[in-house]
Image (cartoon, rainbow, N blue to C red):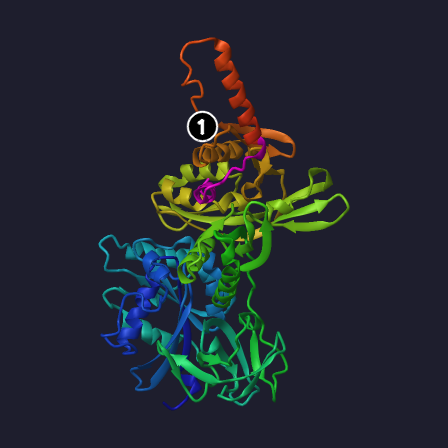
Amino acid sequence: MHYNQKLIRNFCIIAHIDHGKSTLCDRLLEFTGAISKRDLKEQLLDDMDLERERGITIKASAVRFSYKHTDNKKYILNLIDTPGHVDFTYEVSKSLSASEGALLLIDASEGIEAQTVANYHLAKESNLKIIPVINKIDLQHADIEGTNNQLVNALKFNKEDILLSSAKKGEGIKEILSQIIKSIPPPSGSPQAPLKALVFDSSFNIYKGVIIYVRVIDGVITPQMKIKLMNTGTTHQVQEVGTFSPKPRKTDKLQCGEVGYITCNIKNAKEVSVGETITSSLKPAAQRLPGYKKIKPFVFCGIYPENSKDFVELKSALEKLRLSDASFTYEQESSESLGFGFRCGFLGLLHSEIIQERIEREFDISLVITVPSVVYRIEKSNGEVVDIHNPSKFPEVQKITNINEPWIKAFIITPQEYVSDIMQLVKNKRGIYIATEYLGENRLIITYELPLSEVIVDFYDKLKSITRGYASFDYDFTAYKKADMVKVDIMINGRVFDAFSFITHKDKAPYRARDIAEKLRSLIPRQLFQVAVQAAIGSKVIARTNISALKKHVTGKCYGGDITRKRKLWDKQKRGKKRMKQFGNVQIPQEAFKEILKI
């Protein structure tokens, strides 16, 4: 096909989770003939089993197709499907940086939700042309008029610009394609200028090495060309160039404005980072492209192999996953109770769950996960400021001047009848009320400030259960604030198990400590001696429970006779149990680690 930059449109689809992005992608591919009826399957672009099972998109994926418009010209459309969950904002920001426009999808029965607003603002910041689309208009309980009003009032769209569609039934697809061609500008950039290409994603292939997903901003990429990665300064030779339609297809070049992939036989995953600028090593560009906002991990937990022999495999698995998901971090650490493992940082709790499940499925490694924590900023008495994301690295109390914890601004969109329950939940989580804004007659957006540590464990689940699934939630990090935090150690038989240690607010420490102690009492098998489970702040024990000993009826063989015979046997048993307690080792079952996570 003859290349014409003015006939290229690069766009992505953004929406709240489960508003029909992946289904709309399927319909667009089917309508334009990019995929045959034989190859068509639900959620075509979600190629992970995990994505299909959970019905969510985890990885952004790119696809190219052509469409003959009413003006008789054939347009090339590059579509990037994005995730909708709050934890995968990073994937969305990658997609926005490779696009000129975005379809903002809203479910007609649900209306605007928290992630809709967040993604709208992300697209606005990137100066993208936004096309609002109300999806699922075929549903019986679809409120098209109400959703229309929300878009006009809350996000200031013009009513005549809002499109209606049913991705499931294929209604409104032609209008969406026409609007993409009319509204979204063609890519700017010069084919004659020195090469500049943005790396917006990557994956790993055992034969080809790292597959780099690129959006060409200026210039052209061809096979055998020598390229330079501007941030790392390394040079490589391009082996293969191609596009996704939707399967990878080799081409002879990638031109200005196009989206595709290149391979350079790079075997080390760490050499390519997302946001990198690619240029020609012979005629390099003067400046690199502005990298998009780098998002820092918020939630940290330890990941250890269940079998210590799997440590090397776990390291290799994390390296490969890091390649396809640059938003999590890991560093090696060791624990007395769990051996060698890694401290991993995630964008949220769902993100950590997905990574754990991918490791177990894709690499067949059984894992043990420690309690999640956030990054605390500690001011020490010697003037040093340190960031702590592992309770075992927490300094001694006498060396600490101040402890600061991260706070977030939370946006909760909910029907009016659940407001009082939400306010009670947020109050229990140390939240501060900021504002309320109406989106329509019955829906409102409530803004709070909350400590991140109160949100990461069970806040989202509780919010969904008290609102019967109707509320949605999104958040932005705001600042670090001074807090009265303490580190609680869990001791079993007098020995500290660092995997169970946690940092919490002083007022909540006794309750959480009691819950963990009681949980461990029910999970740890009984021994031949009594086992004490204690929770302590420093040397002060704040909770204790005992696991009673298994008893042997040593006097069962005594018939009658003097009581001193029985006493002698009881004393002997007592001495044996004391010795056992001194040298005995309590084995913690793997379920205990998983159950403690749920508290």
Which image quarter holds the N terminus? Answer: bottom left
Q: Give the range drawn in magenta.
A: 582-599
- 591 inside magenta stretch: yes
In screen coordinates, is 73 left or right of 551?
A: left
Vertical placement of 556 versus 72: above or below? above
Q: Which amino acid does label 1 sit on?
A: Leu
- 348 inside magenta stretch: no
- At a point 57% along the width and 76% down the height, the residue shown is 277
Q: Can residue 388 be seen in this view?
A: yes
Q: Position of residue 11 (x, y in %)?
A: 41, 73
- At a point 55% along the width and 70% down the height, the residue shown is 273
Residue bearing mark 1: 550
Q: Can residue 434 be seen in this view?
A: no
Q: Position of residue 168 (x, y in %)?
A: 25, 64
- At a point 50% along the width and 27% down the height, the residue shown is 546
Q: Where is residue 575 in the image (x, y as percent from the top left)?
A: 56, 24
Q: Where is residue 299 in the image (x, y as percent from the top left)?
A: 53, 51
Residue lying farthest to the right in this orientation: 382
